[in-house]
Image: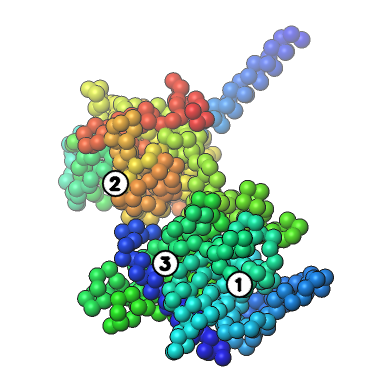
Amino acid sequence: MKQKSKNYVILGLLLFGITLLLWNCTLEEDVLEPEKMDFNNVKTVSFKDAIALFISKSEKIKKRNAYARNTEDVLEIDPDWNTLEHNEIAYTNAQLTTANSEINRNGEYSSELYFINVNNYIRNVVFTIWKDEIDSEGNVMNGRVFFNDLEGKFIDGYIIENGIFTKRYVIQPQAQQASFLSLFFFQSISTEGDCWNTDTLGEFDGGVLEEVIITGNPGGESNNDDTNGPGHSDSYNWYYSSGPGGSGYSGYINGATTSIGLPTGVGSLSSGQISSAAAAILIASPVNPDEDGNCPEGYVFNPTTEQCDPICTTGGKVYNTSTETCECPEGTVEDREGNCVAKPCEGDPVRNPEIVSSGTSGKKGGTFGCTRKQSNKICAGIRGDKKHNGLDINAPINQNAFAMYSGTISSIRNTFSPGQYKKDSYGNYVIITTIVDGNTYNIKYNHLNTVSVSAGQPISAGDIIGLTGNTGNANPPKSKVTPHIHLQVYNSNWSQSLDPADFLNTKFDSNYNTINYDCQ
Amino acid sequence: MIVNKNHITKKLSLLILMIFNYSCIAQVNKINSNESTINSISYLGNNVSFVIQDFDQPNTIEDYYYEIEDVMSKKYIYNDILFYIIDDTVDSFEITGGNYLFTNNNIKIGDNIQNLNSFYPISFANKNSEALYLDFNDIDMHIIISYNSFNNLIDKIAIYSY
């Protein structure tokens, strides 16, 4: 029975894949990646924790149901813990924990419990596929796929019609307080006044299912077999994203491998791909507060969405309900340790920039121009003056160096190890080509210990480009030269070097001391 | 009584001034560039012909690119001493052997770093476990006198730009 049901699941999702593959023919130019998904805080749930969670939840549900008027509504789940296993899912090393289960419903179905840890909170669902009509080979012609919680509350669901996944269940606002029973069984479809309504994929007014897009699977091998027709590959992904006013979550289902030699669009879904689909829904779905309005541990109530948003536990991030990810708040940027650090003002490479003294010329020697002294040099016709082609900005070792302006990384050098000395050398550097007031400039950040950007990469003002340091001539052996960024600005064709002080947000007085630290 | 008060005030002012100078301005001693002599001859900033005259032809001459100044220099390499030459003038040098007396204080490789206490007390007080530093009064360069922390003996004298 279980094996047979499992086959139905596979077949159903196979048909699902067919639909989506066909969709690819018209949407393949509008390819998107599941970038909204945040897999950083996704972890595998151990068998022990899965069982413990289920028992704990079941006990609470039983207590609540003890006062229920109609006990027939109560969903009973009977997991087979001997079938516990971990299944690989896409885009993360975390695995989905699954166990077959029976539920107190009659009919042809296959049901499993799914568990996964998101933001240190274990999410779990009951995944069930119902067959309403099968063909002579037992394949599902009409059916329904549901994701429910342990009490039977609806999380997500799809309709299969004539072997194709045609519709997705959408919660109508007035149905929010409805009995779980009607939600779970979904007795009538698209009937006005019902708890549930459906919309055809891609034609959602309610905005829940904005688009379904099939993308080439980066891990799959492309199929150039002409018999499959153009535009088809051996494997593909699909995902959906929520539209304005939607339920506020998004997800994707990864992977569906077409069968080479079969008619165009025919495909199948492995159990691993099903797991990925379920994991995506688990990871992305909102967490609702309990009847008292309390959110589970690790979540905080969002009065705007009336859902529980994850508490971002690392690096000072905050939850962005639009992108559904933990992000650094305004005015900060994520460093390479994942912490949010304050950006400097636009136009400054570090916070609170100060000019570094260069010896007998003091801070003047750290500025641009004929500002230094050296007996064997001539600058602007004056013997003994030496040109300093840049501005030395104080920067303690291994602090973040920031892009002063948005632009493109035009060149880097990262061949120096941190602190490595070389006489009269700039050490590691980053060059950003940028436009300021309509003119193109090249801004060069020298003596960095490390470089964290690549040539050709676009960059925004305030992005971290590397760590400050003293590579090149900034660190003579056993020296104690003040670590600094030797900042240079050139015009677009590098024919003229310009005073970087003119490009800094921070200004300096006649004694070369910082005038203002604030962003103006 | 009034005289005593003025006397105390003057002493305190002088003390504060000394502390200020010592802690905020003069972390290191300074010398003039023409004091950075080798065997009593000043080479820094002077023509390379003086080097050839006194040291003869170098063992090796190597090309070296000064990236920051975007010029080619030449390294005149002798036994235990190296000169960087730009446009036929001495840009800097490094002493690593004991045959050369640096400054009129006759500092040489192998001397005990303690000997510099009397010449450069501020720099000596602020030296670290590896080196003592001197600045110049007239040019934006500095001198690093390195020493071995196990035996306190000077092992390198070099001039660097900022």
Q: Provide the chain ID for the residue under circle 3.
A: A
Residue A353 sits above or below residue A274 on the image: above
Q: Dot 3: what SS?
A: strand
User: Disc 1 marks which amino acid?
Assistant: Gln
User: Disc 2 marks which amino acid?
Assistant: Ser
Whole-Å distance between the Cαs marked 3 and 2?
Answer: 35 Å
User: Disc 3 marks which amino acid?
Assistant: Trp
- Image coordinates of residue B157 in percent, x first then y, are 37, 44
Q: Nearer the viewer, residue A400 or A102?
A: A102
Q: Which residue is mark 3?
A: A238
Whole-Å distance between the Cαs marked 3 and 1?
Answer: 28 Å
**Circles 3 and 2 on the same chain:** yes
Horizontal side of A279 relative to B58 (left or right) equals right
Q: Residue at x 50, y 34 (%)?
A: A352
Q: Provide the chain ID for the residue under circle 2.
A: A
Q: Residue at x 46, y 63 (%)?
A: A200
Q: Are marks 1 and 2 in contact (CB under 8 Å)?
A: no
Q: Which residue is mark 2?
A: A410
Q: Residue at x 44, y 35 (%)?
A: A346
